[in-house]
């Protein structure tokens, strides 16, 4: 009996399709090279957001949230996400975030990396004024104010009403003709000590560090969470917005490190640089730069796992912008990249 059972197992093994076990569905098949751990069927079912309909929040479908009055006071430039948050993606995130299935981390980082490359190309095309609403028709920006003005012009044509308030910093990185946007630093949404103890890790930090390693961009903790809040998934939109007030503060060591990196690249920021009458000079990479040059905003990419109402992202961005501007006279542009958009 034992020998017949062993023979049956051997026959099943020999007759089974070659390959490995898929991380997500459990089938045994050949896995997809591009997406670690999953089969071709699961890879084909990923609900990618290749072309967001809302230029502010990156949603793949119509977005009523970005028509609301409070978006005039939004503190981040825009959000982009890799996938739509459907039932399958919810299960993937739950396996990683709540059940500690570490193998999902590599998969999600790869997915986030693809969204980042797409974001780089999109923002780069905005900078060069080559993006259009219709194929093969370049979008022409008639204002010299860079990405945000271009973005606003496109939004006017799409929503024709409420727009985010324009920040005062519009200058862009010089890219030597290369249409590729790149932030100065990557950071992530912090979790409370309670959540950190529950999960043993900050999922947003893991994603940020994985992305930074892939694209050789420094990753620094720029924020801390001062208060523990209940899970956002249980709250209404207004409850989410209200609960995020005064939750975050700057991570002093992280901000100091980011400023050190900024100064090595662009010179020392100064409150005096906001005055047209004062033109101080600093040394950067062996050549003198003026205070006007030092007004280049610090461009920060903020990472989180999921974007729902944007209240968490906005609260983080507001702290970063206000702290850098009020404390140092340095403008900051905060961009957001999340794995999923609900």
Image (spheres, helix red, strand yellow):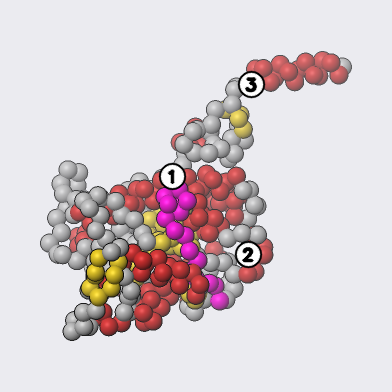
Name the residue carrying label 1.
Answer: 47
Name the residue carrying label 2.
Answer: 196
Query: Closer to the N terminus: mark 3 or mark 1?
Result: 3
Instruction: Assign the C terminus to one quadrant of the image.
Output: bottom left
Q: Percent x, y for residue 245? A: 48, 78
Is residue 325 rendered magenta in the image?
A: no
What numbered label is drawn on residue 82? none
Question: Would residue 257 appear left or right of 286 to someone viewing this image?
Answer: right
Q: Give the structural element (helix, strand or loop) at label 3.
A: loop
Q: Residues within 10 Å of mark 2 (few under 14, many from 20)?
A: few
Q: Residue at x 24, y 79 (%)?
A: 280
Q: Compute the Cα span from label 3 to label 2.
A: 42 Å
Question: Would residue 225 appear left or right of 138 to someone viewing this image?
Answer: right
What numbered label is drawn on residue 16? 3
Residue range in magenta is 211-226
Q: Foreground: 182 or 23? A: 182
Q: Give the structural element (helix, strand or loop) at label 1.
A: loop
Q: Give the structural element (helix, strand or loop) at label 2.
A: helix
| Residue 314 seen in the figure | no
Q: Compute the Cα span from label 1 to label 2.
A: 29 Å
Q: Residue at x 34, y 56 (%)?
A: 182
| Residue 226 seen in the figure | yes
Q: Residue furthest front?
A: 286
Q: Percent x, y for residue 226? A: 56, 76
């Amino acid at each position: 009996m034992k020998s017949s059972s062993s023979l049956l197992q051997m026959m099943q093994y020999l007759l089974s399709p070659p390959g490995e076990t898929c991380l997500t569905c459990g089938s045994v098949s050949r896995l997809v090279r591009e997406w670690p751990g999953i089969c071709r069927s699961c890879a084909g079912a990923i609900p990618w957001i290749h072309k967001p309909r809302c230029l502010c929040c990156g949603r793949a479908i119509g977005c009523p949230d970005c028509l609301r009055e409070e978006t005039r006071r939004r503190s981040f430039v825009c959000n982009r996400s890799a996938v739509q948050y459907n039932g399958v993606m919810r299960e993937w995130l739950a396996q990683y975030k709540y059940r500690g299935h570490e193998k999902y981390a590599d998969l999600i980082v790869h997915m986030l990396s693809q969204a980042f490359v797409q974001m780089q190309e999109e923002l780069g095309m905005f900078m060069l004024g080559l993006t259009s609403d219709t194929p093969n028709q370049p979008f022409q920006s008639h204002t010299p104010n860079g990405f945000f003005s271009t973005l606003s012009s496109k939004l006017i044509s799409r929503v024709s009403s409420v727009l985010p308030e324009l920040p005062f910093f519009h200058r862009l990185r010089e890219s030597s003709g290369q249409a590729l946007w790149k932030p100065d630093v990557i950071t992530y949404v912090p979790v409370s000590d309670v959540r950190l103890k529950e999960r043993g890790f900050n999922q947003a930090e893991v994603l940020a560090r994985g992305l930074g390693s892939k694209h050789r961009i420094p990753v620094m903790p720029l924020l801390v969470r001062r208060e523990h809040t209940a899970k956002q998934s249980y709250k209404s939109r207004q409850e989410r917005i209200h609960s995020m007030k005064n939750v975050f503060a700057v991570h002093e060591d992280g901000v100091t490190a980011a400023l050190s990196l900024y100064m090595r690249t662009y010179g020392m920021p100064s409150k005096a640089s906001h005055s047209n009458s004062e033109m101080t000079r600093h040394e950067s990479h062996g050549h003198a730069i003026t205070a006007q040059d030092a007004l280049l905003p610090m461009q920060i990419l903020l990472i989180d796992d999921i974007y729902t109402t944007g209240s968490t992202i906005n609260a983080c961005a507001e702290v970063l912008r206000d702290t850098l501007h009020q404390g140092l006279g340095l403008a900051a542009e905060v961009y957001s990249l999340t794995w999923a958009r609900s």
